[in-house]
Amino acid sequence: MRSLSLFVILFFCVACVDKFKPHKEIITSCPEGIETKKVLFIGWDGVRSDALQTAQTPNLDSLLQESYYCYSVDRGPYTVSTPGWSTILHGVWPSKHGLTENSFKRNRYKEYPDIFHILNQFKTGYGLATLSNWDAFLQITSNEDYAQRFDTDIAMTADALQLLDQCVPDVLLMHFDFPDDSGHEFGFSPSSLEYLNAIETCDVYLGQLLQKIEWRESNFNEQWMIVITTDHGGEGTGHGNQDNLDQTRKVWYVVRTPGLFSQEVSAGKSVDLLPTMLQWLSCPRPANLDGTPLL
């Protein structure tokens, strides 16, 4: 029995290593941008649509005044994070990118590359950056100038604000994991105060970022597309193998550009976000993407 227990522990540890170990060295060169049109992409991991609408999010609410947004977005099957973020940032469904679980085995990223790879194939010189407090998120993209993992969301936000002061990348990807952590501990539910608090904390960080973006747009002739979305919802304290539950599979997005007329749509698809960002950056859309631009 003791040897069996040891085997189970070792097997579990190997599985954890496959999911969480960083396969990319941390990159720290300054991601100085070359374009006046830029993208800030923010992922709030594991935020259910109904919980988002229940939480007090004044900064996100203010953003809706010039955004195209949807609370019923199909994020595709396999309701765990690695397939979800891959669908969004590679612009294809799991049937193409090949990921169905929190592992990068059997990925087809070479056939269906991420946003950074597509941009660099189109033109050299882009300033590209990824910030996350989850190692695996840093593996979903490639070819960025700057990639950093942080222990806390507050540290990550502080680093982003510094980047926006000093280097100002053309595309800045940020991934906040706090809502997902809270959902696993306290429940993915709009009735969970702890879960709502995690969402509201993300909104506080969003407010700091929006202030910086507003300042840059007012003083440096920049135009920023801001994309905020999630990878999955949840039910109870889980979200894996729940592909048919609306609470898990139906998610949301917000897409803002300066002066955009506010519009809520009744249905959307996660695969539309990558072609939308590429269109904003005047980058041709690869023919093998599954989505189409929203704007």
Image (cartoon, grey):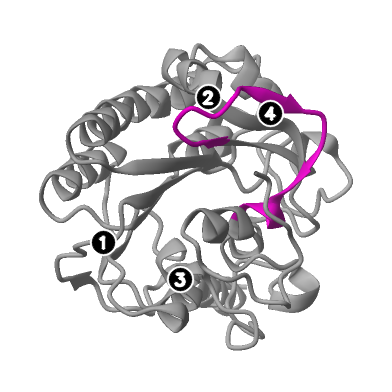
Disc 4 element: helix
- Residue 259 in magenta stretch: yes
Give the magenta-colored segment's residue range. Answer: 255-273
Which comes sooner in the sequence, label 1 or label 3?
3
- Residue 173 in magenta stretch: no
* 55, 142: nearer the viewer: 142
Q: Amino acid at mark 2?
A: Glu
Whether tag 1 and tag 3 are in contact, CB under 8 A, the answer is no
* Cα gap from disc 3 to disc 2, whole angstroms: 28 Å
Q: Which residue is mark 2?
A: 66
Disc 3 element: loop
Q: Position of residue 241 (x, y in %)?
A: 79, 54
Q: Which residue is mark 1?
A: 148
Q: Amino acid at mark 1?
A: Gln
Q: Amino acid at mark 4?
A: Ser
Label 4 crowd bin: few (<14), some (14–19), many (20+), radius 10 Å = many
Q: Measuring 48% from the left and 27% from the top, which residue is drawn there?
A: 259
Q: In the picture, residue 77 is in which quadrant?
A: bottom right
